Amino acid sequence: MAPTIVAPITNSSEITDFIISKGNGVKGLSEMGLKSLPKEYVQPPEERMSMSQIMHQESIPIIDMSSWDDPNVAESICNAAEKWGFFQITNHGVPIEVLESVKEATHRFFGLPAEEKSKFLKENSPSNNVRFGTSFTPEAEKALEWKDYLSLFYVSEDEASALWPPVCRDQVLEYMKSSEAVIKRLLEALMKRLNVKEIDEMKESVLMGSKRINLNYYPTCPNPELTVGVGRHSDVSTLTILLQDDIGGLYVKGDNGRWIHVPPVSGSLVINVGDALQIMSNGRYKSVEHRVVANGSKNRISVPIFVNPRPCDMIGPFPEVLEGGEKAAYKQVLYSDYVKLFFSKAHDGKNTVEFAKI
Ligand SMILES: COc1cc(/C=C/C(=O)SCCNC(=O)CCNC(=O)[C@H](O)C(C)(C)COP(=O)(O)OP(=O)(O)OC[C@H]2O[C@@H](n3cnc4c(N)ncnc43)[C@H](O)[C@@H]2OP(=O)(O)O)ccc1O
Ligand SMILES: O=C(O)CCC(=O)C(=O)O
Ligand SMILES: [Fe+2]
């Protein structure tokens, strides 16, 4: 096949057109072999990661879930959710082959030609529930983020069969299905500590009534020190179950404000508390700021499953948490209002949660 000749991209509108409108993403830009970072991606110094901000001696807990019935396991999960808001789990019951095949499927999707991927851009996608994009909210961001993504909001198997990209659909569905048991176990343990004895239908809906899965692709970057893969944010989910590959680059904010690396552990899943669980637990479990650095020599992928309330659910502190006389720190908010606020602005740390504070 004759090589495609690509003219150099020089100005801002050409960048936007090539990356956003034509569906090449930052992957397309990276593959052109550009020597320096376009100015649109240069983050202000306070948003870049410097070595002095990293705390090398700390690490988030790694919890072995093989003896699930041992009360120490549930205890470790709740302690980690209170102190760190982040932990890794091993022996979680999701087969390693399922994890490997969803990673392969992610590479397959991003390996498609831009014309194929652009069928899922917001303007072209057959549904709002399937979206291929780049950065986070390019229209609201002063500086763009070095990441492309495919975001899939799960409605039903039938909808997924009809609308999700066939190159990754089955593997993504399998990963979602096989992670259900561990998600339930985690939530059961976390609820017990909140005095919620049973996860009835109402609680199940508000804790895990909707799911979104993102396939993230962070291409090699010419000046990784000047930009970010994902800027500082907390997730708006109840819990996030994240599969990362073996490259590394995810950092979590520790309680002294410095950043702790989440090292890839083969076969593990990273779990983090989202804003919805912080609100429902009245602040007992913490959604913690995290970010992803760009990489100068390697492409990285990650696959988070965001476990959420349903968009139509009202969320607020559970009555069981307030039974002992604790004052509510958050009001009742409509979850879709909360998520729309999150998606309407650039990443801004933990600011979204202010919307729900009393
Ligand atoms: C992408 O990079 C990210 C993502 C994240 C995500 C972290 C999370 O925690 S995701 C969990 C989000 N929660 C849910 O999906 C819960 C359930 N869903 C909803 O409540 C709704 O689907 C909705 C998201 C509120 C959308 O409501 P709808 O009424 O259908 O309206 P839309 O027109 O579809 O969207 C409204 C508005 O939201 C933005 N948006 C929607 N989906 C996405 C998406 N997948 N990615 C980015 N932005 C999205 C968008 O601004 C829409 O406005 P437009 O004018 O652009 O249409 C963490 C870190 C990352 O880097
Ligand atoms: O890629 C990662 O490791 C984390 C991505 C993330 O924080 C997100 O998609 O919300
Ligand atoms: Fe996140």
Image (cartoon, rainbow, N blue to C red):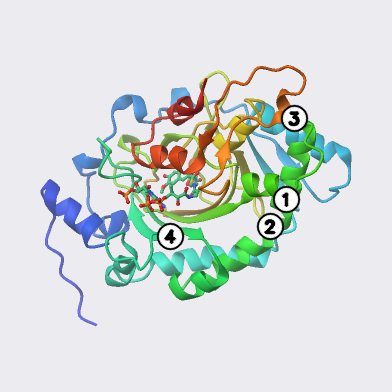
Dot label at residue 129 = 4
Dot label at residue 321 = none
Q: Report the residue marked by disc 1.
A: 184
Task: Relative to 195, say whether 174 is above or below.
Answer: below
On the image, the x and y values in percent for residue 101 come to: 58, 68
Q: Earlier in the sequence, mark 3 or mark 4?
A: 4
- Which label lies toward us, 3 or 1? 3
Residue under the image location 32 percent in, 44 percent down: 137
Front-most of residues 287 and 355: 355
Task: Relative to 215, say whether 337 is above or below.
Answer: above
Residue under the image location 31 percent in, 26 percent down: 45
- Which label lies toward us, 2 or 3? 3
The kind of residue tagged 4 is Asn
For the residues labelled 1 and 2, say whether their Cβ atoms are less than 8 Å apart: yes
On the image, the x and y values in percent for residue 315 come to: 57, 36
Q: Earlier in the sequence, mark 2 or mark 3?
A: 2
State how far apart marks 3 and 1 are (Cα): 19 Å
Q: Label 1: how many residues lie within 10 Å, few (<14), some (14-19) or many (20+)? A: some
Q: Label 2: how many residues lie within 10 Å, few (<14), some (14-19) or many (20+)? A: some
